[in-house]
Image: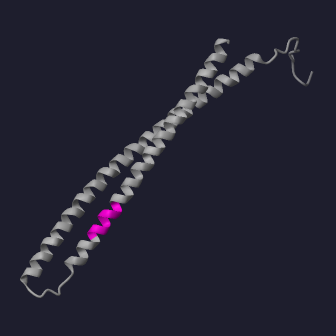
Amino acid sequence: MRPEAARLKRLQRLEKVRAIAKQSAALEAARAEGTLAQLEALADRTRRMADDYRGRTAMRDGLELRQLGTFVAGLDGISTATAGDAATARRVADVRQQELAQAERRRAAVEDRAKVEERALIQRKAPQALGAKRQVGTALE
């Protein structure tokens, strides 16, 4: 195999590897986005639940009021922790999206190099037009 053809084959294999890496990065990005969506929904649901319990006013005695206050404080803690987890998941999802974009750029760069190499190889294989007459002068002559 000629060196040009071998180079083209290597570039095509590298493109396939980069495409697989892009698929893997896309899968990881999708997982991170899914986790983020779940955590944001959980944080929102917990926050709404705490607000609902906080708004209750029909207490019979001080014990119920104290228990409700403790319960609402616990829900607030859970909501705060979940919101923190969602923020962390957002950062992870952003990193995964950046990795996906980088993988796509790498794949596209290799694809472009392979196309250029293929065009050059085809051009080299094309028969040379021997004896082609070069036009001299202008059309006015």
Instruction: Give residue 51's position: percent from left, percent from top.
Output: 24, 74
Look at 50% across and 38% down and name the residue there. Answer: 22
| Quadrant of the rendering where the N terminus is positioned | top right
Q: Is residue 90 magenta?
A: no
Q: Observer-nearest residue: 107 or 79?
A: 79
- In the image, what residue occupies the spot 37% across and 59% down? 38
Vertical position of residue 129 compared to residue 72: above or below:
above
User: Furthest residue to the right?
Assistant: 141
When asked about the image quadrant of residue 76, the answer is bottom left
Judge left or right: residue 65 versus residue 139.
left
Residue sitting at the far left = 62
Reply above or below: 109 against 61. above
Q: Is residue 46 magenta?
A: yes
Q: Is residue 121 above or below residue 101?
A: above
Principal secondary structure, stretch drawn in magenta: helix
The magenta region covers: 40-47
The residue positioned 26% from the left and 69% from the top of the image is 47
Q: Nearer the viewer, residue 65 or 98?
A: 65
Q: Quadrant of residue 120?
A: top right
Answer with left or right where residue 77 lies relative to residue 66.
right
Residue 108 point in image, percent of width and height: 56, 34
